[in-house]
Amino acid sequence: MNQTWLLPLQQALERLDRSVTFFYRDDDAGWDTPALLRLLDLFDDLQLPIDLAVIPKAITPELAAILNTRLVQYHNLIGLHQHGYAHVNHQTVGRKCEFGEMRQFDQQLHDIVAGKEILHDYFGNRIDPIFTPPWNRCSQTTLDVLNTLPFTVLSRAEKATPFSLNQMVEISIHIDWLKRTHGERWGHEQVIRLIAEKILMNSSIGIMLHHQEMDQEDLIAFKQFARLIERHPNIRHKRMCDLTDQIESVMR
């Protein structure tokens, strides 16, 4: 795969004179396990940390066993946290949302607690106190629920509707590796141009992945991107739970 598409990022890196931390959130763990394992193998090869947003109702005993084994082997490189409950839409109008305005406090509390218990049964205290809502959407009620539970971090897209966080903090995703506009998928070169812009503005950059939508070309492109930035002395990589020292930089 020709690497001229990385030129805008290479030029941005040449201008970079301060530290920038990258983190990677892969959504929908529980769906398409073979694709998930291919992505985890890639991150293992790159020795990069990755955070998996796990759908409680989609997790299987078989996948849980695989992830528990990998957590032991690569415990500093893999983070797990809750991704909604069943990843189903409960909105009858508007954009898809599992925890939207149409669901009351008690309904949301029931599902979030049920999901939390499923993940605890499989992974115990290896689950990080982070909540990523499906489709990066939720309501203020969701925050009210999360504040009654042992969650400390909400993770959504950078331009999500702002809410009162109370005791929680928000770690935002800035880049969708599989970004679409009006249903049309961006090319890798368009995504790289966006990363190049962000790298000169942000101290932290969160990249969202969806393993089940990534084909071999996507994996190769990501590997080329990762190999390029790893060579820069000012680039760091962290799990989301290790971002607390930079939390003001990644909060919206």
Image (cartoon, helix red, strand yellow):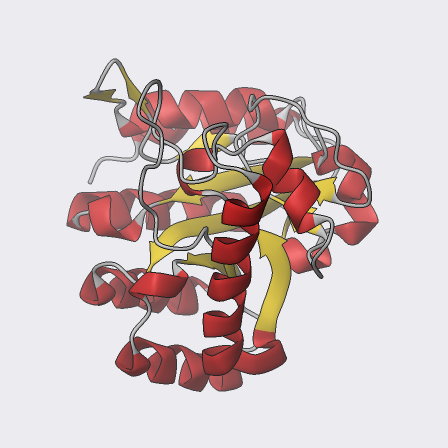
Depth check, front residue: 195 or 184: 184
Depth check, front residue: 98 or 154: 98
Residue at image point 43% right, 62% down: 46
**For this view, does 226 lie left or right of residue 148?**
left
Q: Quadrant of residue 232?
A: top right
Q: Quadrant of the N terminus?
A: top left
Residue at image point 17% right, 47% down: 215
Q: Quadrant of residue 18?
A: top right
Q: Residue 116, image x and y in percent?
A: 53, 65
Q: Residue 152, image x and y in percent?
A: 72, 53
Depth check, front residue: 129 or 75: 129
Q: Is residue 174 above or below residue 42?
A: above
Q: Is residue 131 visible?
A: yes
Q: Is residue 122 above or below residue 103?
A: below
Q: Residue 214, image x and y in percent?
A: 23, 46
**For this view, does 6 lie left or right of residue 62?**
right
Residue at image point 25% right, 24% down: 187
Depth check, front residue: 1 or 133: 133
Q: Residue furthest top?
A: 182
Residue at image point 30% right, 29% down: 188
Q: Residue 224, image x and y in percent?
A: 35, 46
Q: Is residue 73 above or below residue 35?
A: below
